[in-house]
Amino acid sequence: MAPDPGATILTPAQRLSWLRLIRTDNVGPATFNQLLSRFGSAEAALEALPDLTRRAGKPVRITTKAEAEDEMAGLARYGARLVARSDADYPPLLRFIAGAPPLLTLAGGAALDWQRTVAIVGARNASSAGIKMTRLLATDLGAAGYTVVSGLARGIDAAAHAASLTTGTIAVLAGGFDKIYPEQNIGLAHDILDAGGALLTEMPLGWEPRARDFPRRNRLVSGLSLGVVVVEAAQRSGSLITARLALEQDRDVFAVPGSPLDPRAEGGNLLIQQGARLVISAADIIDTLGSADPARTSLFEGDWQPDLAAEAAPPSDSDKSRLLSALSATPMDVDELIRQSGLSASAMQMLLLELDLAGQIEWSSGQLVALKYL
């Protein structure tokens, strides 16, 4: 893997500051990027946070240097490491998704091809036919030189990993590196590392995965991949969330058809009706991805970044009121918010930072923002 062009490799002190910032309460990837854009460095952002969160009316707890050092030492004991998006071993396709994690925890994967990747996802309560199809697809994709990505769940995910152990597989975790879920797949996780595969997560050590963490994981599964294959999935399932995220990230979506009488086939059949590529063998996937450019950066849209060429005065309370009036529970493009509110890009960034740190807004697809109703 090659480093991000033009990126600055972090010093140990800078890496520690990045870790402190991303682990601070209410600082997600979008907020992290805006803090860096506004203040120039993680160190400067950490210094500005106390005043910034007081303005937001909800001070947040900032991760201490000692806590960040403890996490790094803990990762080393597990044989894992922190990878920044400027590092050579940061997954190249992941750089171009909106909300890409500034830091990842990564173990293994040094010999994998991270640019020729296919995700295989599906039902946890998979049928025997679904498991067999998954094994065939993963085996043939691996033989064709593709690395298989999945989420280490029961059923289809586990079958995809197991079938691609010798050719290369990446497991994306919803929790911390020391909190592998489900526990029954801890042995499979060790097998993946022993075979030269990789385990990856954006969550801190000790993090027990919650229901809302699985969609976050799913965006990484699709973001790591050129395409996503859905083998079996109910209509309301995490696999369909992964497929939707893949479309937002300009990845190809494939689905294996199934019997209309089997609820586990409803999601895949629906995807095919909506335009997903029908799959009956790995050749259907390989033929499509063979012409795909792994560096389709011109088609990808990253996080919103304001033009801060001219420094403006801090936004006023009336500016905040105008923004809150323009926001709703419906996700809205930031540029449209600027047009509707009449605020400058600089004022908009500061206000969104304040609201984000106070836990009042949420981002989707990196460009859209909505009020969060608790």
Image (cartoon, grey):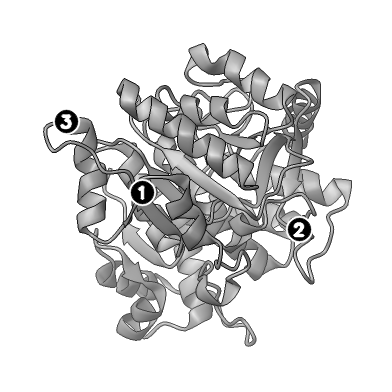
What residue appears at the point 67 percent right and 47 percent down from the top-left corner?
Answer: 103
Res 113 visible: yes
Residue 262 is labelled as: 3
Q: Dot 1, how many residues are within 10 Å of its Cα: few (below 14), some (14-19), or many (20+)?
A: some
Which of 40/124 is in front? 124
Look at the picture and state if 126 lies above or below 297.
above
**Where residue 303 sits in the image (x, y, percent)?**
52, 66
Nearer the viewer's eye, disc 3 or disc 1? 1
**What is the distance, in whole Å, between disc 3 and disc 1 at their CAs?**
18 Å
Q: Is residue 235 visible?
A: no
**Camera-side residue of 179 and 145:** 145
List x then y, in percent, for residue 168. Answer: 66, 36
Q: Which residue is mark 1?
A: 279
Image mark for residue 86: 2
| Residue 320 point in image, percent of width and height | 38, 69
Mark 1 or mark 2: name the one nearer the start of the chain: 2
Q: Nearer the viewer, mark 1 or mark 2?
A: 1
Badge 2 element? loop
Q: Secondary structure at mark 3?
A: loop
Please state which amino acid type lies under the numbered disc 2: Ser
Q: Is residue 311 above or below residue 255?
A: below
Q: Which amino acid, mark 3?
A: Asp
Q: Which mark is residue 340?
A: none
Q: CA distance from mark 2 to mark 3?
A: 45 Å
With respect to residue 110, does 347 lie above or below? below
